[in-house]
């Protein structure tokens, strides 16, 4: 256990240890309640075992919920970090001013695009004819 708070991991080591410990305690309590209730002949004796089983389930569920909430918080923090990063200004695809075509297609793409379409940013393009395919829905060719 290193106690690391690595950016690639949603949970810290302590969170995983907490999950395992609460799952073990809850599981042992549920198993003990099961075996205890199976050996009891009267409902009044089985009620005490039922209470133990409910408490075991509560410990198990509580530990699991806390673990999931920690993961959800980590996802939210990462999302906020990604949203806060300022995007670089979009770079348009290189356009040959001497070319007589007005439609382009990115290599491996099926749709036709306007030469300045943001979906072509940084991708190699080739000239295309209007009959070569469907227009892109983003650049509204």
Image (cartoon, helix red, strand yellow):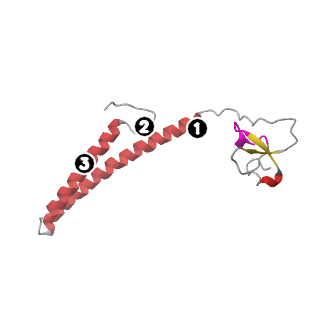
Q: Nearer the viewer, residue 123 or 141?
A: 123
Q: Which disc number belongs to residue 9?
A: 2
Categorize mark 2 by other alpha carbons within 10 Å: few (<14), some (14-19), many (20+).
few
Residue occupying image coordinates x 42% and y 43%: 71
Q: Hey, which quadrant is residue 41 in on the image?
A: bottom left
Q: Secondary structure at mark 3?
A: helix
Disc 1 or 3, which lies upstream in sequence? 3
Which structural element holds mark 1?
Answer: helix
For the point 54% across and 38% down, the residue is 80
Q: Main secondary structure of the magenta part?
A: loop
Q: Which residue is mark 1?
A: 83
Q: Which mark is residue 24?
A: 3
Task: Quote the CA–CA distance across marks 2 and 3.
Answer: 23 Å
Q: Residue at x 15, y 65 (%)?
A: 38
Q: Position of residue 19 (x, y in %)?
A: 31, 44
Q: Earlier in the sequence, mark 1 or mark 2?
A: 2
Q: Earlier in the sequence, mark 2 or mark 3?
A: 2
Q: Quadrant of residue 134?
A: bottom right
């Amino acid at each position: 256990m290193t106690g690391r708070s690595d950016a690639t991991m949603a949970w810290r080591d302590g969170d995983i240890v907490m999950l395992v410990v609460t799952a073990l305690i809850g599981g042992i309590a549920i198993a003990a309640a099961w075996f205890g209730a199976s050996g009891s002949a009267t409902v009044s004796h089985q009620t005490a075992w039922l209470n133990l089983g409910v408490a075991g389930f509560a410990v198990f569920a509580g530990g699991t919920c806390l673990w999931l909430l920690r993961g959800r918080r980590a996802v939210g923090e990462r999302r906020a970090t990604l949203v806060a990063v300022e995007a670089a200004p979009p770079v348009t695809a290189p356009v040959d001013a001497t070319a007589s075509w007005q439609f382009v297609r990115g290599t491996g793409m099926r749709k036709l695009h306007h030469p300045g379409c943001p979906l072509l940013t940084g991708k190699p393009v080739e000239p295309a004819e209007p009959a070569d395919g469907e227009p892109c829905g983003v650049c509204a060719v």
